[in-house]
């Protein structure tokens, strides 16, 4: 047997044993997934829409440094699902896992106080109304107040004022609200 035949047999045996033991050669990928050329990750540039940004500023002003405003918070991070039945727990968790509220307000100690949803035009769609009913039910059951407001109406909201006074009764709230605005704002207790 020649040297080249011996090398060929050794390489063939090594390949055979490697494949039999599940060893695979992996090539580095430049992206995520097998079709990385079809997928690209790009910055959204802005976290908040113009209406959400205006509401964020109004909410920060209304709190007057008594608490913190967190935008776009996942409901499952605010509300915990409890069940002794694993299947029931998973079903309930899945219903809230990918849903967010526009803002969550927490105390300086990090306690969750209340959440805020800005109900723009998209909330008129049938699918959004169904989602809003679920969100209202979840927050009511958990005992976390949920303030709903139309865009641009948050700072003038009597309900927001009531929720803030609930957590900070001694607070002197600003009287910058525009008088005569129709209140399309409600608090889910």
Image (spheres, grey):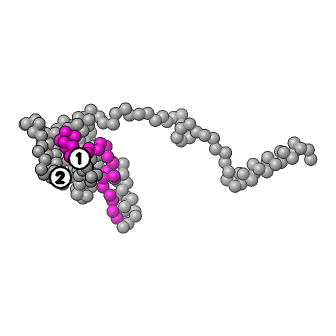
The percent coordinates of residue 57 (x first, y second) are 23, 36
Relative to 160, say whether 54 is above or below: above
Relative to 114, say whether 36 is above or below: above
Q: Residue at x 37, y 54 (%)?
A: 94
Q: Residue at x 46, y 35 (%)?
A: 41
Mark 1 neighbour density, 10 Å: few (under 14) some (14–19) many (20 or more): many
Direction from residue 71 to residue 20 in the image, left or right:
right
Labels 1 and 2 touching (C-beta < 8 A): yes
Of the numbered discs 1 and 2, the one sitting upstream in the chain is 1
Q: Secondary structure at mark 1?
A: strand
Q: Which residues are magenta?
A: 60-83
Residue closest to the far bottom: 84
The percent coordinates of residue 50 (x first, y second) are 27, 32
The percent coordinates of residue 71 (x first, y second) are 29, 42
Asked whether residue 83 appears in the rendered view, the answer is yes
Q: Secondary structure at mark 2?
A: helix
Residue 141: quarter of image: bottom left
Residues 111 and 44: in front is 111
Mark 2 neighbour density, 10 Å: few (under 14) some (14–19) many (20 or more): some
Direction from residue 126 to residue 178 in the image, left or right:
left
State the separation of the CA atoms marked 1 and 2: 10 Å
Residue located beneath label 1 in the image: 67
Say how many tags the image has.
2
Q: Residue at x 31, y 43 (%)?
A: 72
Relative to 144, say whether 123 is above or below: above
Badge number at residue 87: none
Residue closest to the far right: 1
Asked whether residue 129 appears in the rendered view, the answer is no
The percent coordinates of residue 110 (x first, y second) are 28, 52
Residue located beneath label 2 in the image: 167
Quadrant of image for the C terminus? bottom left
């Amino acid at each position: 047997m020649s040297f080249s035949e011996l090398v060929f047999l050794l390489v063939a045996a090594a390949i055979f044993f490697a494949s039999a033991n599940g060893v695979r050669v992996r090539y580095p990928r430049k992206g995520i997934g097998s079709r990385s050329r079809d997928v690209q990750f790009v910055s959204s540039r802005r976290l908040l829409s113009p209406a959400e940004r205006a509401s964020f500023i109004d909410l920060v002003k209304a709190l007057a440094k008594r608490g913190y405003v967190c935008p776009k918070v996942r409901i499952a991070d605010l509300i915990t699902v409890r069940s002794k039945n694993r299947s029931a727990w998973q079903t309930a968790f899945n219903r809230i896992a990918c849903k967010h509220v526009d803002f969550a307000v927490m105390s300086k100690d990090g306690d969750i106080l209340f959440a805020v949803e800005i109900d723009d035009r998209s909330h008129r769609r049938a699918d959004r109304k169904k989602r809003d009913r679920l969100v209202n039910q979840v927050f009511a059951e958990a005992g976390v107040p949920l303030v709903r407001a139309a865009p641009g109406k948050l700072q003038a909201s009597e309900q927001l004022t009531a929720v803030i006074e609930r957590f900070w009764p001694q607070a002197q709230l600003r009287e910058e609200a525009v008088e005569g605005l129709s209140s399309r704002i409600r608090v889910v207790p």
